[in-house]
Each structure stands twice: as C-alpha cells, then as structure tokens.
Amino acid sequence: MSSRLRAPGIRLATTVLFAAALSTPTSALARALLHATLLRSTPAANSRVAKFPDAIRLVFSEQIVPELSQITLVLASGDSVRLKVANDPHDVHVLVGTSSVVGRPDGVIKVIWRVLSADGHPVGGNFSFAAGSTSAPRSPTPAVSSHATASTTPAAIPAPVPAVSPTAAPEDKPVPVVASLFRGVGLGAFMAGIGLLFFGITAGERRTLIPGAAVTSLITVGTLLLVAHAIAWLEHASPTMQLSGSFLSSVLSTTLGRIEMLRVALAVLTLWGIALARHRKIALVLGIGCLLVSGAVGHPAAIHPFIAVPTKAIHLLAGSLWLGGLLWLVWLVRCDSKACEIEAGRVSSIALIAVIAILLSGLIQTVLFLNAPSDLFRYDYGKLVFSKIAALVVLIGFGIYNRYKLMPSVAAVDAQRKMGRSVKLELAIITLVLMISGFLAYVPTPPPPQSAQTAVTQGP
C-alpha cells in the first residue's frame, strides 16, 4: 500500500487519538470531589457552643490557598469581622481563622467563607452557629458551595447535620465563559503550533518545507490567548473582580499563581524564539516546557497531583503530536506530494505511539474524575465529556469515509473537492472540542457517592 493510501489510515488513527483528548481532567479514585468542598467546620453549622470560639476551623476536600482565602463573621449586632486566616500547620486542607473579636459576644454568628482551591477555582459559602445561651439556629443557612458543613463539636452539645444537598453546586461564581474559551482555544492553537514545529524540525532534508508562517501564527494566537486567559482567571479568582496590587502580590506568593505565571512566561518566550530570535529548536524546547507546566494547572493540581499532573502533561504532549502530524501532512499534500508520501510513514509511527499515550492517559484521567458511567448524563461535567466522546465518534466516521470512499478515487477532481470539505469539517469539529476542553477546566466534577460523602462528613 502506498504512503498516500496510508495517510487516511493515519488520519483515522489520529482521530482516535484525539478522542482520548476528550478526557482531559481527572477524578479522585476513592475520593472524587468537586473543586474545594467544605466537609466540616468547628464550630459546626447549626450548633451551639458555650462561648465565642478563639478560632474558626474549616476542613475542605482539597488543599486551600490561605493567601487568597477569606473568613468573615457577621455578629448578632450586624457588625462584620474579617479573620486572619492560615493553613493548619499539620493539614493543608484545613483553613483556620483566628478571631480578634473583643468581648466574646453571644448570639447567632454567621460565618461567610471564600477560598481558592489548589486547582485555581474560587468557592464560597456560609453557615451559622450560636454562642452562649442563645439557642442554635432553627434552620440551617444553606452554604452556597458546600456538600455539608457538619462537624465535631463539644461533647455536651450535639451538632445537627445541616440540610445541605450533597449535590449542591460548589461555586459562588458562574463558569467564566470568556476565560474558558481563551483557555481551550489558546492551548489548542499552541499545541498545534508546537506539534507542527516538531515534525518540521525532525523532517531531515525536508525540514526546508516547514510552514514557518503557519507555525508562527499558531504560536502567536496560542500565546496571546493564554495571556488573555491568565488575566481573565485572575479577575475570576479575585474577591473584588479587580486586579489590585495586593491581590497580584498574594497570587504570586502562592504555588498556584507562580505555576500559572510560569506557563504564560514560557509561552511568551516560545513566541520570542520563533518570531524574533528565529531559533526554531529553542522555541520547540520552550514550547514543550510550556505544555509540561500546563499539566500542573487546573484540577490535576488539587486531586492526586502525583498521578494527575504527569498524566495530563503526557496527554497534552501526545495531543500536540497528533495535531502537528495532521497539519504537517495536510501542508505537504499541498506543497510537495512526494515529500508527503515519504513523511507519511514517520508520522504514522509517531501517531501510533501518541494514540496509545492519549488513550492510557485519558483513561486514567476519566477514572480519576468520574464516579460511574452514569455521571456522563447526570452532571454538567459529565455531559461535556460525553459531548467530546460524541465528537470523537463523528471524527472516526470522517476517517472511515475518507479512507474507504474518497481515497480510492483521490485522483478525481470531485473526490479531491469532497476531501477538502471533509478536512474543513474535521477542523471545525476539532475547534469545537477544544472549546469544550476549556470549559471542562472550570466546570466542577461530579460529587462523590452519597455513601462516601456520609462517611467523610460524619466520621467513623
């Protein structure tokens, strides 16, 4: 079989590879949880304590960034008190707010909390408790973003479990549409540019055929959108929706903020390497570094990072090879059909490795983030994943159609015209999938099963 005839098979194989990209994020093996879920508190929601506490302790499902978190008390008098917060030195999942209230007032106290979890998503909620002789609140104040806020309280005072739905939405802000689009399309364009650059650099004597303008354009678009995403994410994470100097300083003092800024810096340096320095190999190394760092951004940074972060990095690199290989062959078909026949075998071999890598990493990530197949239909996150799976099926259909219907008569003008339309439709579907991927980074994953949640909130 000629290389020209193998090319559609490559497209079909790489289409399957892209499907693995349909499962970018992950789930927590035995503990699949939403962004950052409030598991319990001290004092507990709806409880009564003998005296005003010295500190408020909030236990979350994920590591919490204290520099970008807040706990505010609303006293019975109506006064608001902002607490000084820090992580428990023995547990990064615990946020401790130190009380500076004078006089230890009695009455019903409302606790309003807002945190930034390690995956970069702001989450907030509230609950109430009573101090002194005041009766505990008769009905719980529903937390905006927690599954449950029951906790251990003094032995003499029973703590009722608040009536908070275990499937309550965890976000106090809507999913940022603009930031999601910037992230998905920006990272996709950057991956395509780096993949295309890789195949061009490693093409031997055919490296002179590398489409420099296309590579530069893809990396430029990707970099600009990643910069725009970083700004949109900062606005989303800011409590006031404003990028003040103190807030930016707080962000840069956290591992989360430094990783996001490092990704942006590497993208900008990649653009510099390809557009200004015109050193393609340096640009390729910097671009690969940017994709590796991207593996530590988002959900994987908070849930089983030792598994999820390298898995996502492999996922992104393999996806970059898939996109780059497809674009490389499309380019060679137009500019040098002989070179395309020669390169088809090499691209096919690399694509096969990439397919395996994406399938395995995609499977791991899906197991980490979804509790059961039914989550594909019950939750927004699962529905988005299902949409990507449906897109995969369509892309596979295009590959089969091209391979068995169009390629046998590819020399015919009509077949070439149909092939062109098919490729355009494939690229349109891929663009849609990239947009969905951007939203997956911000949409909360499915909550844990009720039995597991009960065990977490009630304790042994």
Image: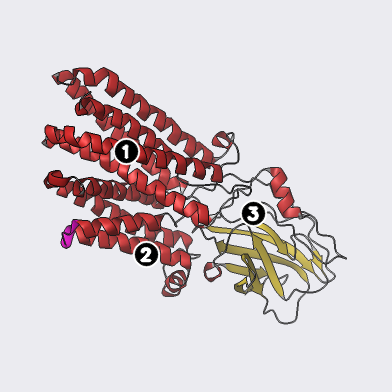
Looking at the image, is mark 3 or mark 1 nearer the viewer? 1
* Image quadrant where residue 410 sits: top left
Task: Check disc 3 and report the residue beneath it.
Answer: 146
Q: Which residues are magenta?
A: 275-280
Residue 262: mark in rendering: 2
Query: Which amino acid is tagged 2?
Result: Leu
Give left or right: position of 445 versus 259: right
Give left or right: position of 142 versus 34: right
Are the two marked residues, 3 and 1, in contact with CB atoms closer than 8 angstroms?
Answer: no
Q: SS at mark 3?
A: loop
Tell me if I can see residue 299 in this picture: no
Tell me the residue at 30%/35% (across/down): 428
Task: Check disc 1 and report the residue beneath it.
Answer: 351
Q: Earlier in the sequence, mark 2 or mark 3?
A: 3
Q: CA distance from mark 2 to mark 3?
A: 31 Å
Q: Is residue 53 magenta?
A: no
Query: Which amino acid is tagged 3?
Result: Ser
